[in-house]
């Protein structure tokens, strides 16, 4: 079954916005367009529900019910229990709160593992624990390919002192999809929990976190067609083993333990619109899973098949040029459609030139300073990043390649 791209694009108001006409969007890794159901829910909340939720009067009860709906439906889509999902202001902020809990939890002699493939959000907060005397071990990428080899993790776990392994589902510059289930099983076998940064992967299909086995899975809803929230799944065992980071009287409620700040009521409620969208895609394509997670898996596969078909011609085109360095795998099946290339000139300036051809792309380090340094990329030049998702069309890929031909 092929993805109906026309139907998909009809769910996003941006594609009928006159000011965006003729513009092809290739900086989706920085934040996606927002789907219509999210915008509708956000608008309704601000128009009809904007009071303190959960109070004993109708409008407050409706507001609270919409927030609860968002948590319940999104958790079901991700294959986890409702109270294992929490909302925060951003993934970076969620990670800092989590890192503080881990700081208080670890005992002398215990260690954590980080990678140099991650966005700084899943690297810096953990590395700062070294300032508290905690041992931080680095799982390093191949400096030529950017590959994160699970075999290189094994010796880091061998002494049994590692309690937490932090790694990305895929890097926001390398693009290669890491085998979360296999890495998680390896870590668990050695007595360690895992924290997975899914920010760069979740836009390409909501994962079944329950099936992956990850103890923590983080992503950003503004990159998955929703409002600006950080979403964190933390499974029950680790969630109650770590010390509470919220008000003391909220400590018995799992989804409140790691969100010390008050939630953005409207944006939390609007997150249910992301599930509305996935369910609309499923219905349109005749998908009816036995559970929300099963339906999500089928939609995930539909998205990935479309992205993979569009990605391979772009990779082939870039790999065939001798004036740039294509970072990450050259086969579409093993990577997300987030493509970074190193050039012999400033990448942001090239992105500016592409804008003149109706291509919206970005240049810089994208907070992936450590992987770029490990790959030997000049940070001052940065990389040109071309990222797309399932609403991208074949015609837009052709337009991008033509623009690259004219610019590079």
Image (cartoon, rainbow, N blue to C red):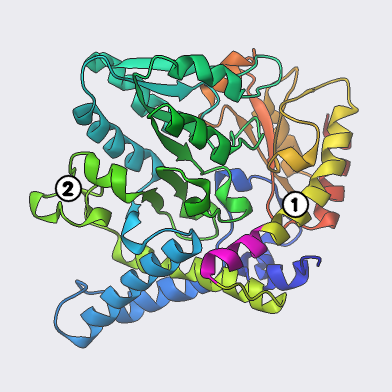
Question: Circle 2 is placed at which residue position?
Answer: 246
Residue placed at 29% from the left, 38% from the top?
98
Magenta part of the chain: 291-300
Q: Secondary structure at mark 2?
A: loop
Residue 86, image x, y percentages: 33, 55
Alpha carbons under labels 1 and 2: distance apart: 40 Å
Residue placed at 78% from the left, 41% from the top?
332
Residue 39, image x, y percentages: 49, 70
Quadrant of the snapshot with the N terminus: bottom right
Q: Is residue 162 visible?
A: yes
- Name the one closer to the observer, 18 or 257: 257
Residue 191 on the magenta segment: no
Answer with left or right where residue 233 lies relative to residue 35. left
| The image quarter in which residue 346 lies | top right
Residue 160, image x, y percentages: 37, 19
Answer with left or right where residue 330 lies relative to residue 208. right
Q: Is residue 119 visible?
A: no
Answer with left or right where residue 240 lies relative to residue 137. left
Labels 1 and 2 touching (C-beta < 8 A): no
Label 2 crowd bin: few (<14), some (14–19), many (20+), radius 10 Å: some
Question: Circle 1 is placed at which residue position?
Answer: 307
Residue 388, image x, y percentages: 69, 48
Overall secondary structure of the magenta stretch? Answer: helix
Looking at the rendered structure, which numbered label has been put on residue 177? none
Residue that extends furthest to the left in the rendered view of this protein: 249
Residue that extends furthest to the front in the rendered view of this protein: 189
């Amino acid at each position: 079954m092929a993805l109906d791209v026309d139907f998909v694009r009809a769910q996003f108001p941006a594609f009928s916005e006159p000011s965006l006409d003729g513009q092809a969007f290739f900086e989706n890794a920085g934040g996606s367009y927002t789907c219509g159901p999210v915008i509708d829910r956000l608008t309704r909340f601000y128009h009809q529900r904007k009071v303190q939720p959960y109070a004993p009067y109708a409008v407050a009860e409706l507001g609270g019910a919409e927030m609860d709906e968002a948590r319940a439906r999104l958790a079901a889509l991700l294959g986890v229990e409702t109270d294992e999902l929490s909302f925060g202001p951003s993934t970076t902020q969620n990670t800092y709160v989590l890192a503080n809990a881990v700081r208080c939890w670890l005992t002398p002699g215990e260690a954590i593992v980080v990678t140099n493939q991650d966005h700084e959000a899943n690297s810096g907060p953990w590395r700062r624990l070294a300032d508290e005397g905690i041992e931080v071990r680095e799982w390093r990428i191949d400096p030529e390919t950017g590959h994160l080899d699970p075999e290189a993790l094994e010796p880091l776990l061998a002494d049994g002192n590692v309690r937490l392994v932090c790694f990305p589902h895929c890097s926001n510059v390398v693009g290669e999809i890491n085998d979360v289930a296999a890495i998680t099983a390896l870590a668990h076998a050695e007595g360690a929990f895992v924290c997975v940064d899914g920010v760069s992967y979740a836009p390409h299909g909501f994962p079944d976190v329950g099936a992956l086995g990850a103890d923590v899975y983080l992503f950003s809803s503004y990159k998955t067609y929703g409002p600006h929230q950080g979403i964190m799944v933390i499974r029950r065992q680790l969630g109650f083993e770590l010390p509470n980071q919220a008000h003391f009287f909220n400590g018995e409620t799992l989804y409140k333990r790691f969100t010390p700040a008050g939630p953005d009521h409207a944006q939390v409620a609007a997150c249910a619109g992301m599930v509305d969208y996935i369910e609309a895609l499923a219905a349109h394509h005749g998908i009816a899973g036995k559970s929300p997670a099963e339906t999500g898996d089928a939609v995930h596969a539909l998205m990935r098949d479309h992205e993979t078909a569009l990605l391979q011609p772009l990779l082939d085109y870039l790999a065939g040029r001798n004036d740039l360095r294509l970072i990450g795998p050259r086969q579409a099946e093993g990577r997300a459609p987030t493509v970074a290339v190193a050039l012999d000139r400033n990448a942001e300036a090239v992105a500016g030139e592409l804008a003149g051809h109706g291509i919206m792309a970005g240049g810089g380090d994208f907070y992936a300073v450590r992987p770029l340094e490990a790959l030997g990329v000049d940070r001052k030049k940065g990389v040109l990043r071309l990222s797309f998702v399932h609403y991208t069309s074949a015609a837009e890929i052709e337009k991008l390649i033509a623009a690259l031909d004219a610019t590079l």
